Image (cartoon, rainbow, N blue to C red):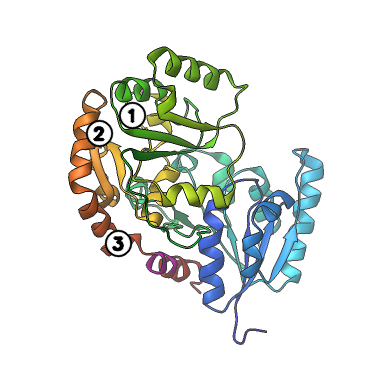
Amino acid sequence: MKENQSTVALVEVGGSHDECLLSQLVALNNRGCKVILVCNKRIQERNPHFNEWVDQWIIFDFFSKAWQDFKIVRKMMKDIKRSGADFIVFNTAQGGIVRNAVLISLFSKIKFCGIIHTTRKFEGSFTQKLISWKIKRYLLLSEDLLKSVPKNRLGLDYFYPLRFPKGEPVMKPKADNLQITLIGGVENRRKDLVGFINMIEGIKNIHFIFLGKSDPKNEEVIQFKKELAKRGISKQVSLFDTFISHDQFDRILQKTDAILPLIHPGTTSAEQYFKNQIAGAMTVSFSYKIPLLLHNSYRHIEEMQPASIYYSVQAFQLAIEQFLSEKDIIVERMVNHIGYNEEFQEERYLKFVLKG
């Protein structure tokens, strides 16, 4: 047993946002807390590396049937209380299941806080207002987003979850081609695919990797492949038909020269990212110290400035030339930037979560 420990239940009631969990588990464990991870079986099975940092698992699966889910939530909260938890952190502090969990616990002495993944939840969501009866402190995943949220009675702060399951560092091979990685699969909602094809056509000696599953049966993926073939650039772009393992994710990033979020103003991607939520590409970049290639429209976002080279779709080649001349300087700047330091961010997290 750890002495003088606080017990923290880290709760993920959905099946996603695994990427935010490891930083929290490591931070809490290193602080000497007893750590309980509450999640579904899928998260447990695809993250065996969590076992090193978890003292107790509480496994629940929800079925999207209100009466059934309410019974499960009630049992889940009883099990958390029985574990002796002093603090509960909701890894995704939104939605009906979280609402039910906090309403059941309105008079609990356990201290609650949570992570919000989109600031839209603060813009008139009735469910979120109910959640905030109990969860009065929220973490965002971006300093820029924190600045955009109107000040109110809620306690707000931010942190970057920068830990990923990494293998031993490897030397990037000296190659004629640059490797540029796009985090995630082919999806118009998250990336400007039309802009991408236009800006890479005619550019040589660069290989682009979409690091996520691009379902070959999906109509967007089919059309994207057809357009690449039509332009004669299929060999410059790699896609994956299946989900990416942690090891594969790490191996590819270890060899990556730059990360391209592919978020452009005036597209569906811009409706989702940087205005209301942050792209996962940002935290991956900060963690691995891999420079970002970012559209000119986002120069104003201070937290990404130390990591970024900026481009326009029409003059992407010029940005590549600038990147080649400044890459080493940018990487050194990222390594020395305190905001991109894992321990610094985890200390921010602990100071917020373990507040009495």
Q: How crowded is the residue under tag 1: few (<14 C-alpha within 10 Å), some, or many (20+)?
A: many
Q: Is residue 92 visible?
A: no
Name which residue lies at 81% across and 50% down. 71
Q: Kindly check if marks 1 and 2 are in contact, taking CB atoms under 8 A apart as contact.
A: yes
- Location of residue 42 in the rendering, given as x and y in whole percent from the top left corner: 71, 49
Q: Quadrant of residue 90?
A: bottom right
* Element type at mark 2: helix
CA gap, disc 1 and disc 2:
8 Å
User: For residue 335, which numbered disc appears in the image?
Assistant: 3
Give 334 or 296, whichever is nearer the viewer: 334
Give 138 or 45, whichever is nearer the viewer: 45
Which is nearer the N-term, disc 2 or disc 3?
A: 2
Amino acid tagged 2: Ser
Dominant secondary structure of the residues highlighted in magenta in the image: helix
Q: Give the residue pinned by disc 1.
A: 264
Q: Tell me how many marks there are.
A: 3
Question: Range of the magenta residues?
Answer: 342-346
